[in-house]
Image (tube, rainbow, N blue to C red):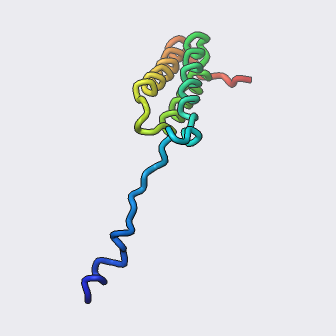
Amino acid sequence: MSANNMSGPQRVNKIIRYKPPSTEANPTLEDPTPDYMNLLGMIFSMCGLMLKLKWYAWIAVYCSFISFANSRSSEDTKQMMSSFMLSISAVVMSYLQNPQPMSPPW
């Protein structure tokens, strides 16, 4: 067997490392979903805390999970974690004030 056959059919001089397109050059590539879900999570958690509605608190947790799942690793994690903790505290406080199960919203 030749040395060429053992290393495989790769052409080392043709390998180009992938570089993701920068969002500064093309701002349409940036996905605003995590930011919107983060904002919605904060709004719903504040409504859940102030209005004592368990549905809003659970929707806030759902929005926080979506925001966390769609975020990039380079984004600010402090704001995301504070939104998540606010939504969890809204659920906890709504159940501490009224431990009855949730009633349907209709």
Q: Is residue 91 visible?
A: yes
Residue 53 in the figure: left or right of residue 7? right
Of residue 90 and residue 103, the one placed in the foreground of this image is 90
Which residue sits at x=34%, y=69%? Answer: 13
- Say which quarter of the image contains residue 17: bottom left
Question: Residue 106's x, y, as percent?
Answer: 74, 23
Q: From what the image shows, is residue 5 above or below residue 27?
A: below
Residue 5 in the figure: left or right of residue 77? left
Q: Is residue 99 visible?
A: no
- Say which quarter of the image contains residue 54: top right
- Say which quarter of the image contains residue 58: top right
Residue 70 in the figure: left or right of residue 7? right
Which residue sits at x=52%, y=29%? Answer: 64
Where the N terminus falls, by quadrant?
A: bottom left
Residue that protrudes farthest toward the bottom in the picture: 1
Question: Residue 2's x, y, as percent?
Answer: 26, 87
